[in-house]
Image (cartoon, helix red, strand yellow):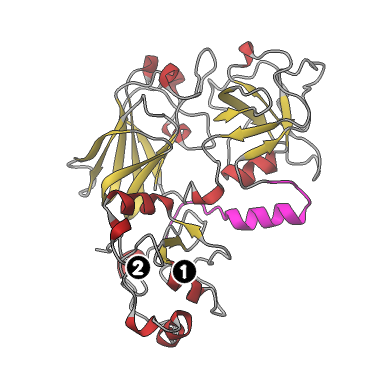
Amino acid sequence: MADPFCCDVCFENYDLDSRRPVLCSASVSCGNSVCERCFEALIQQEEKACPMCRSTLEDQKIRNIALEHLLAQQGQRSTPPKVCPADSEAPANSFLSRLGSKKLSFRSSRRRPSTNRVHHTSDLKGSLRSSGLSATNNGTLNVLGNCIGPDSSGKFFTFRAADLEAIVGEWCSSAMDSASTNFVVKGGEGAVFRAKNPRSGKVGAVVVWGGRRDAGGGEADAFGCWNPADYADAADWQVADSVQLLDFAGGLELYAPAVPVVSLELKTETGWNLDADKIRFGQCGLVGGWWKGLEVQFNLPAPHVVTAVRTDSGPALPFALSFSRDGGATWEQAAAGLRGAPLACLPQPVTAQAFRLAWAETDLHKSEGLSTARSGGGLHAQLL
């Protein structure tokens, strides 16, 4: 079994100095990490690829923040970093000489195909830049307008769907041509995010929808407002406002690629009978039936190391994580009382093929900005 605290290339332990864990790829199908020194060597190769799964390497370092949090929790900060003796003078050159024809024996447990859909964030951002769109990587959307049809009160804002996709990846825009002024997500359409308007200082949940994707590079093709739309106020939004998505600030470093998931299963009822997939970031979110308990099972394509859970449920809605290594026949609890803010690190990494997240209650009035009153929507979560 692979050691999550050890670089799969040089086999040295990660630390918070010269051997910080760095993600090889922004693709959700990869999720592999190497130490910072080995990453610097790998990007000098002609074929820039993850040594475990051959995904294309990132051009920039994307720190594995979840694993860094875990290292800090275990007191690794005071541990002197281990250095490969052969690399002490010129780490990149000596590593490349040992890499040779790329036939090093990497841990086979990390070599596995993924059947889930791959989303290359870096490729998407590159295409957006080339097309002249103003996608940001700090979790901020630019407001291009505040009118939907005849409504010019400022209750709503318009933006480019591609800009949001550059920040959060794929998001639910199934109501693609809807310019409704009373849009709700009870049917699972649209997406909900915790957000802030820096001009007004208001913090809450925004619901966004639309995205015809045929409006041209510079035109707004998506809509949003504070959730629920019934309670939106005149002058909530002005042209040139920004929408800060609170759970996406900091770019990829804060939300490392999620563990690949092939299916999700509900173990409890949900509000408005929405399916389990709505718990993903970029969807409307989930609550338990009548805002009570919620339990969702994450099924992976193969055993995978999980070090943390990312969620927007906040400190007032703790949750538990359990896992199964025998196809769901038996379950063990990995941790209870976890609180996402937005990362909840596990006491120890867990390798398994199925995980369950369980909240005893989902009263979103206790969350930091989410709302489900009259509108649908709820909390989101993913495994890291």
The residue segment tinted magenta is 113-135
**Quadrant in which residue 45 is drawn:** bottom right
> The residue under label 1 is which amino acid type?
Cys
* Nearest-to-viewer mark from 2 and 1: 2
Q: Nearer the viewer, residue 267 or 233?
A: 233
From the top left corner, tell me how far across and down residue 106 is, in percent. 34, 74
The quadrant the N terminus occupies is bottom left
Q: Tell me if 242 is positioned left or right of 274 in this view.
A: right
Helix or strand or loop: what does disc 1 sit on? loop
Q: Tell me if 227 is positioned left or right of 12 in this view.
A: right
Vertical comparison of 224 with 281: above or below: above
**Quadrant in which residue 192 is drawn:** top right
- Residue 197 forms part of the magenta stretch: no
From the top left corner, tell me how far across and down residue 251 is, in percent. 56, 48
Q: Residue at x 20, y 49 (%)?
A: 326
From the top left corner, tell me how far across and down residue 183 is, in percent. 64, 19
Instruction: Tell me the tag on residue 50.
Output: 1
Residue under label 2, please give it: 7
Q: Residue at x 69, y 46 (%)?
A: 135
